[in-house]
Amino acid sequence: MKLLATFLRDLKVSYRSFYIYIEFIMALIIVAVLLFVVPENFNGQGKLYLYLDPALSNSGIEEALSKDESTLVTMVESLEEVKASLSEDRTAQGASITLNGGKIQYDMVLQGYESDKVRNLLEEVLKLELLKEDPSFEPGTAVRTLEENSERLSDRISYMPILLLLNSAFMGLFIVAAYIFMDKEEGTIRALTVTPVSIRDYLLAKSGVMLFTGLLTGLLTTVLVAGGQVHYGLLLILLTASNFFGTAVGLFIASFYDSVIKAMGALYVAIMILAFGAVSYFMPSFSPLFMRILPSYPLLFAFREVFLKDADTGFVLQNSLLFLGIGTLVFLVSVKRYQKTITV
């Protein structure tokens, strides 16, 4: 009962200050950006303006190039029109394919800002698409698919794991520290030594407020952006574990300082380290050992699972239990530190 009463009191107090509304404001900004700025899927299709010699109109070159889905080919009437089109569209490239002395001549028309590597790559891609139509052509690269029919998230939804991790899971790292320092300045936390409320209950109540807010903003963001195609049970479990872990880290860091100004550097470094796992999330091929041992690395991929139709339930639960356990250990260490520093 004492814990519940402390939690309700802290909940009322926290919602009277501006700190807690930072998380809600961030959640609304995230929703607005994802719904009105980020497209459902980015169009990575390149644009190529092509002049094809009339003498090659029946050679099958145009048909071969049109099969390349990664490039939108626009046919023009002359090389001059290719150049004019490039001057109007600075993101496109151009090409001219003519018949010269009985041989096919390829001319790439570029913007001028491309590096030599990009120029060579564009040239080889163009040649490759044409060579594929030659019956005697044998590709020198073997493609092996490791997992058939693997599910892919939309570009918009793929941003949700990192946004949920930073705003709903780890935002409590900053906010709980701010409330601890506010209570220190007002003398509230020291007054606990002469009340029936223990330091453990006080810190649990703070963690409960952060958890309540994190779940609220996480669900709000997910419902508005992803709708009903989410495993909400797994999401709640994962949000609970990651939020408690982030809050425990915030409590631990705050135990070493007596003001939010002094703790700001350590809190900032902590959140940057935790956020660094996003590099490997967006570039899975880059996952060195130091990146994989970051807490955010497995959490990001666990959050990704809850948005997949066939989620790996075991992977999500395993990570939830792991970080719930780590968070509990960090929380208990924080309790010991506060008991020593407050009663001195």
Image (spheres, grey):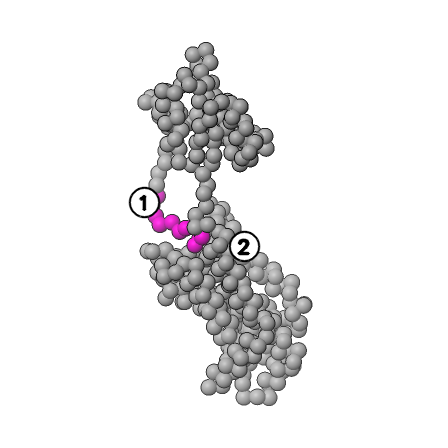
Report if residue 231 is visible in the image. yes
Query: Could you say which is closer to the camera, residue 256 or residue 105?
Result: 105
Q: Position of residue 244 (x, y in %)?
A: 49, 69
Q: Where residue 180 sits in the image (x, y, percent)?
A: 60, 75
Number of other residues with Cα within 10 Å of mark 1, as a class: few under 14, some 14 to 19, many 20 or more: few
In the foreground, 85 or 243: 85
Q: Is residue 154 magenta?
A: yes
Q: Residue 309: horizontal and vertical position, in percent?
A: 34, 56
As displayed, is residue 149 above or below residue 175?
above
Please report the bounds of the magenta region as a residue range: 146-158
Callout 1, which amino acid?
Glu
- Across and down, in percent, residue 25 comes to 54, 65
Residue that badge 2 annotates:
276
Tell me, yes or no, if residue 341 can be seen here. Answer: no
Q: Is residue 235 magenta?
A: no
- Report crowding for label 2: few under 14, some 14 to 19, many 20 or more residues within 10 A (C-alpha): some
Rendering quarter of residue 268: bottom right
Residue 52 versus residue 329: which sits nearer the camera? 52
**Residue placed at 57% from the left, 61% from the top?**
271
